[in-house]
Amino acid sequence: MRILAIDTALPAVSVCVLDENAGEPVAMESLAMEKGHAEALLPMIERVMAGVDGGFASLDRVAATVGPGSFTGIRIGVAAARGIALARGLETVGVSTLAAFAAPLLTQESDSIVAAAIDARHGRVYFSAYGPAGRILTSPRILTVRDACRLLGGSRVRATGPGAILLRDEASSGADIVPVQISAAPDIVAVARLGLAAVPDNAPIRPVYLKAPDVKPPANRTSPVVTA
């Protein structure tokens, strides 16, 4: 099976094509950016696919990160993946951003907990935790940094993701939290591997929003009554 993986959920645009039995990607590209995901994504997909023998016709599946992350970024990646899949008749799967951060650590032999965290602002993090063999201990949710550390208790923890430092600082006198593999966005190869392993019926390509938007449209105002 060959998959096209897309990530635009955080401050980066990344694209990867990976074969099921290959150790290295067929082609990939990643670019860190705070804005401009919509303008950068489709040209990047075209460049990556230009380096793939058989092009789009060689693909079996398309994956995209579905959150948590930026509202706009998530929508951009999901829409692109759905469009390509519809045009080519391909399977689609959604990949958790938190799971993609945690995945590289879960392949390493260790009895420590792996915690993935993304800064959700205002003292909160998007958070999930995993035990040995990838067992889910805490499903993705939004918590205060303090509550996330309380869930970890006094455990030995390897923390990853852009919110890992927040966990370590909050738990300085509590859990043994060691930040590792900190990056602003997940490894696109990890996204692709999770996409290959996913079961489509259990991994819908549907945005996962764990909090309401920071910006809301203005409330409707009642029009003044005009009398003759």
Image (tube, rainbow, N blue to C red):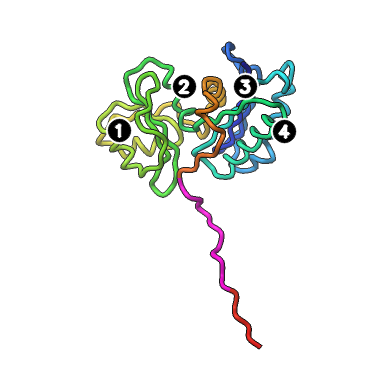
Residue at 52% x, 33% y: name it. 185
Instruction: Decide: few, some or many residues near mark 1? Use Cα within 10 Å; few <14, some 14-19, many ≥20.
Output: many
Q: CA distance from mark 3 to mark 1?
A: 35 Å
Give amino acid for label 4: Pro
Q: Please state the extent of the stretch shown in magenta in the rendering.
A: 211-222
Residue at 56% x, 73% y: name it. 222
Considering the numbered disc 3 on the image, is that residue within a helix, a strand or a loop?
Answer: strand
Disc 1: which residue: 152
Q: Quadrant of residue 138?
A: top left
In the figure, is residue 42 to the left or right of 215?
A: right
CB-based contact (under 8 Å), mark 2 and mark 1? no
Q: Quadrant of the C terminus?
A: bottom right
Nearest the eye: 132 or 105: 132
Instruction: Decide: few, some or many residues near mark 4? Use Cα within 10 Å; few <14, some 14-19, many ≥20.
Output: few
Q: CA distance from mark 2 to mark 1?
A: 20 Å
Q: CA distance from mark 3 to mark 4?
A: 18 Å
Q: CA distance from mark 2 to mark 3?
A: 18 Å
Residue at 56% x, 70% y: name it. 221
Give amino acid for label 2: Pro
Q: Which mark is residue 43?
A: 4
Q: Quadrant of residue 91?
A: top right
Considering the numbered disc 2 on the image, is that residue within a helix, a strand or a loop?
Answer: helix
Q: Which mark is residue 113?
A: none
Disc 3: which residue: 3
Instruction: Decide: few, some or many residues near mark 2? Use Cα within 10 Å; few <14, some 14-19, many ≥20.
Output: some
Q: Earlier in the sequence, mark 4 or mark 1?
A: 4
Disc 2: which residue: 104
